[in-house]
Amino acid sequence: MTKRDSVFFLSLFLFFFHGANTIIISYMPVYFQQSGMSESKIGSILAIGPLAAILAQPFWGYISDKFGTIKKVLLITLVGVAIISIFLLTNHNYVFILISAAVFYVFMSPTGALGDSLAVKTAASVNRNFGSIRTWGSIGFAVSTLVVGQFFAFFGIALILLPFMIMIFLAFFTAMKVSDVKTHNKPVTVWDAIRIGKNPRFLLFLITIMFLTIPHRANDSFIGIYITDLGGNESQIGLAWFVAVASEAIIFATSHIWFRRFNEVVFILIAGLIYAVRWIGLAYVGGPQVAILLQVFHGVTFGVFYVAAFQYVTKLVPEHLQATGHLLFISVFFGLSGILGSLLGGMIFEETSGATLYSVMGYVTLIGCLALLFYRTIDKRKSKRDESYA
């Protein structure tokens, strides 16, 4: 298989996997709500998965680095996702759903991160920009929100398992066609993986960005419910996600133009300031139409943040441990931040309102921007000291 063919099938894999992820992020909370669950119970279900993912993601990253393969690990996790989703999306017992969600995310959460790690390595091997490949995941997400939203509006959200399984099957089929990219022959030990987590520069970065990622994950969990509270329906939820991820796809696709003009941390700070405006704006919307319009900011928040942060993490960790480093980053973004965003967001939403939740998210993000300025200052001083000793 040529490198061009590999890029083609990798792009298709990202398209179908993120199309499946759309259903989980955008519609699973609404599915549980229509099953009669409260916001706090939904929050706990959404939080238990990321809790499992915190342990699972570094493990799968280590296994990938240890055996020098991403493709085989992807195939294993996709099979796990397909099997466990049957139990998660066909049962109505709260405790059983909690257990199923934990096991589901053990397989689901690392799959996207491993795909992105493979995209980074593939892009480097063919002299392409990471964002130009990753954009197909965003396109898949956007197309899926629109198509699946219409499907649910016509047939009902009770059939959530059907489109999800179709997407996962297509993702598995295309993943089988992808070529592995090996960039090192150095043996990887458990101690190597532990040493990444003890890197003070890496740790401080992960802690700092949590002020941005916790509100982001709270939005992922509750934007659908918020739109229904504003008077919207499943079709409008799908349209909201389509607008958001379409703007994200544009940012990814054009990253070769705007990226590298500044330091990655500067881009993350810019994204953080726009995040704050986005959340506070959503707190004061008067209906689902305005909420949908504000979703256009998703591209210049998540899109810019993710490209910059993923590339920055690539610089912070040794080459032979990049999959481990990438999954540690994803563990914080989609794991720990997912837990806190879902639990705290669910409690704030239930005790007050969606508008209050988004207002709090905006102010927390502003605190994160100040923390990023502090991190940037410390990092620049350390870099200058290192250069003077070199």
Image (cartoon, grey):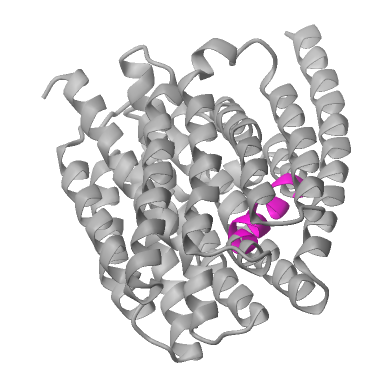
| Residue located at (20% from left, 35% from top) | 178
Q: Is residue 384 magenta?
A: no
* Residue 2 quadrant: top left
| Residue located at (41% from left, 58% from top) | 149
Q: Is residue 337 visible?
A: no
Q: Is residue 216 magenta?
A: yes
Q: Measured along the vertical axis of the image, is residue 61 above or below residue 129?
A: below
Q: Is residue 42 visible?
A: yes
Q: Nearer the viewer, residue 221 or 153?
A: 153
In this rendering, would 385 be left or right of 67?
right
| Residue located at (74% from left, 22% from top) | 266
In this rendering, would 216 be left or right of 307?
right
Q: Measured along the vertical axis of the image, is residue 234 above or below residue 270?
A: below
Say how many tags the image has.
Answer: 0
Image: magenta residue range: 211-223
In this rendering, would 71 be left or right of 29?
left
- x, y percentage for residue 98? 49, 81
- Our reading of the magenta stretch's main secondary structure is helix
* Residue 124 quadrant: top left
Hey, which residue is sitting farthest left in the picture? Answer: 1
- x, y percentage for residue 384? 81, 13
Q: Nearer the viewer, residue 12 or 332?
A: 12
In the picture, the quarter occupied by the C terminus is top right
In the picture, the quarter occupied by the N terminus is top left
- x, y percentage for residue 344? 74, 69
- x, y percentage for residue 8? 23, 27
